[in-house]
Image (cartoon, rainbow, N blue to C red):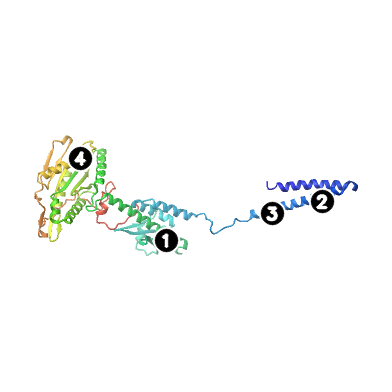
Amino acid sequence: MKNIPSIVAFVAALGLLALTAAVIVRPAADLDLWRGGTMALAWVVVLATGLAARERVAMSTAIASEEPPRHDDMPRRPDTASIALFDFAREVHGTLESDKLRLLISRRLPLLLGVRDVWIVARLGTRQQIILPAASGVDPMILVSDEPRHWATFPMKSDGRTIGLMGAALPDGGFTEAQQKLFKNVASLLAQALSTATAFETMREASLVDPLTGCATRAEGSRRLEAELRRAQRSRTSLAVLMLDLDHFKSINDRFGHKTGDAALTAVGETLLTTLRASDVRCRWGGEEFLLVLPDANVERAQRAADKLRQRIASTPIGVGDQVVSVTASIGLTLSVGDETDAQSLITRADAAMYEAKRNGRNRTSIVLAGPAAGRRSAVQRAEDSPVHTEPVVRAEPGDEPAADEWDGVERRDPHRRDRRRTPSPGRRATDAVVSGRWRDS
């Protein structure tokens, strides 16, 4: 369309040229003034149109050959490094579980930074986290070898507070200014992500764990009991449920105050932690009452664990000024049978067994079974070395407390060993005496 004026001018010029030639070859008498003026005016129009078309074509060619103007305020297309950093930031901030976050960092960080040897050391609360690369073909142990190496370190700051360091192996020529800027941005990004994940897990743990005893809350204990009951049904194994209640706990609060009562509950929670297996469920059911779930346990094994718990609780001294107070516990025990899936019926039987132990003198274990063994109701008598007390025992001299019963290691829980289902029982992280740990992807 833009060439139409040029074509029209060209056709008009040809026509005018033919008319001019015809006038020249005809006699001069036939040429009047009006025709001569008309031809002159036509020539002027044709020449003007041609010149305008030529100028327009030249301008279009010049504009096409020039680069588009650039302005500093115009948005620029992000480069590949910026896109990779944005994707990495989106992934780490979308991961709130600490284990998954550390695994993601160990795999993606070396690729993002373009440095094979990179590490992170961060302290969040009472835990120290060490993250090493997980790239294929890289042995993380070379980072802690005796060979001297040069490292560039970058502080990891979260909310204005330094929580750790990110280190990268320094090449011979050092890092460029762009690389250093990238490292600083990544260090700040990871600090925020790790802090957020730790805060999320702390809040989640607070909703699942009783802060005084380190046991699971009642809601979490009920959920774990139902899960273990379904697992026992699938695996065709039995499940033991114990209801433990401290004897004369109200007398402790009345005579020595609630602070001593809290100390007794804390001591019982620690005894449960160090005695039971990692896969066993410890739950503070209410007040001084505890619900315990022992997967893959028969009557004999559950009874042995209950007796050991009673002995340990009775032999655990609780300091009250210059006095030492001891408490005892009554335990009711029941066992799941066949395809039993009703958790409430198990709790009811264990509760009934616990009250039977109370009626029979306290500081003992009673068993109530259902199904084929429904007729078997036995009160397992207390151990000879655990005398019955109708009131809390107060010994004036700390050295008078009985020696702790030696544990045979069969049921003892190792707080440093991972659970066989790779799921720690509630409260394990909050109560285990582990303030630092080393983590790396294997």
Disc 4 on helix, strand or loop? helix
* Residue type (three-letter) at the residue carrying disc 2: Ala
Task: Identify which residue is drawn at 75% across, 52% down.
Answer: 48
Above or below, 355 against 417 in this view is: above
Sequence-first disc among 1 and 2: 2
Closest to the camera, between mark 4 and mark 1, is 4
Q: Are marks 3 and 2 in contact (CB under 8 Å)?
A: no
Sequence-first disc among 4 and 3: 3
Closest to the camera, between mark 1 and mark 3, is 3
Residue 395 got which mark?
Answer: none
- Image coordinates for residue 151, horizontal then vertical, percent: 39, 63
Sequence-first disc among 4 and 2: 2
Examine the image and state in which quarter residue 315 appears: bottom left
* Residue type (three-letter) at the residue carrying disc 1: Lys
Disc 1 on helix, strand or loop? helix
* Nearer to us in this view, 293 or 418: 293
* Residue type (three-letter) at the residue carrying disc 4: Leu
Examine the image and state in which quarter residue 375 appears: top left
Q: Which residue is mark 1?
A: 184
* Residue type (three-letter) at the residue carrying disc 3: Ala
The crowding category of the residue bearing disc 4, from other C-alpha atoms within 10 Å (few below 14, some 14 to 19, many at least 20), is many
The crowding category of the residue bearing disc 3, from other C-alpha atoms within 10 Å (few below 14, some 14 to 19, many at least 20), is few
Residue 346 got which mark?
Answer: 4
Q: Which residue is mark 3?
A: 58
Q: Are marks 1 and 2 in contact (CB under 8 Å)?
A: no
- Image coordinates for residue 218, horizontal then vertical, percent: 24, 46
Residue 40 got which mark?
Answer: 2
Q: CA distance from mark 4 to mark 1?
A: 57 Å
